[in-house]
Image (tube, rainbow, N blue to C red):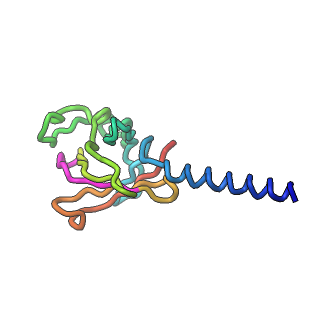
Amino acid sequence: MIKTMMRFGMAVAVLAASAAWAQDVSPVGLWKTIDDETGKPKSLVRITDNGGELRGKIEKLYRDTGEDQNPKCDKCEDARKDQPIVGMTIITGMKKDGNEYNGGQILDPASGKVYKSKMSLNDGGKKLDVRGYIGVPMLGRTQTWVRAE
């Protein structure tokens, strides 16, 4: 009887620990972005937490052999204009809001446009849905990024 109670107690402890871990999953880490049209990897973005604000910086671009391996953001209209895309911060201002992260902005270096943005984790923290939009979230598009770590 004591052995059964101990096993039961251990099982409860394991379940409680795994539930606590699931609640602590965050977007912080390295993410592989996927091109919507081709399905191929596009870049690696590292998301960091800076005092409750999530920021994302491009660490690597996946480029074809004939393409510029260190392109600059020639279409950007802010301080990032003509700056290298690798090392560029493209996500700013994201803050936890329930099960989502909202209130931020995301830059599309290909177009130079900055969009409002929100993010949510899926698949136990292995995938991140990143939505960029104009005005309201309904007017935008979502990319699913895959955790690279």
85 vs 130, nearest the viewer: 130
The N terminus lies in quadrant: bottom right
- The residue positioned 18% from the left and 48% from the top of the image is 114
Q: Position of residue 112 (x, y in %)?
A: 18, 46
> Could you tell me what secondary structure mostly forms the magenta stretch?
strand
Q: Is residue 111 left or right of residue 26?
A: left
Q: Quadrant of residue 137?
A: bottom left
Q: Quadrant of residue 70?
A: top left
Magenta span covers which residues? 110-120
How many numbered circles does the render carry?
A: 0
Asked if residue 115 lies in the magenta stretch, the reply is: yes
Q: Position of residue 57 (x, y in %)?
A: 33, 38
- The residue positioned 20% from the left and 52% from the top of the image is 115
Q: Is residue 136 above or below residue 17?
A: below
Q: Is residue 96 left or right of residue 114?
A: right
- The residue positioned 17% from the left and 59% from the top of the image is 134
Q: Position of residue 71 (x, y in %)?
A: 26, 36
Q: Is residue 143 left or right of residue 117?
A: right
Q: Is residue 32 left or right of residue 141?
A: right
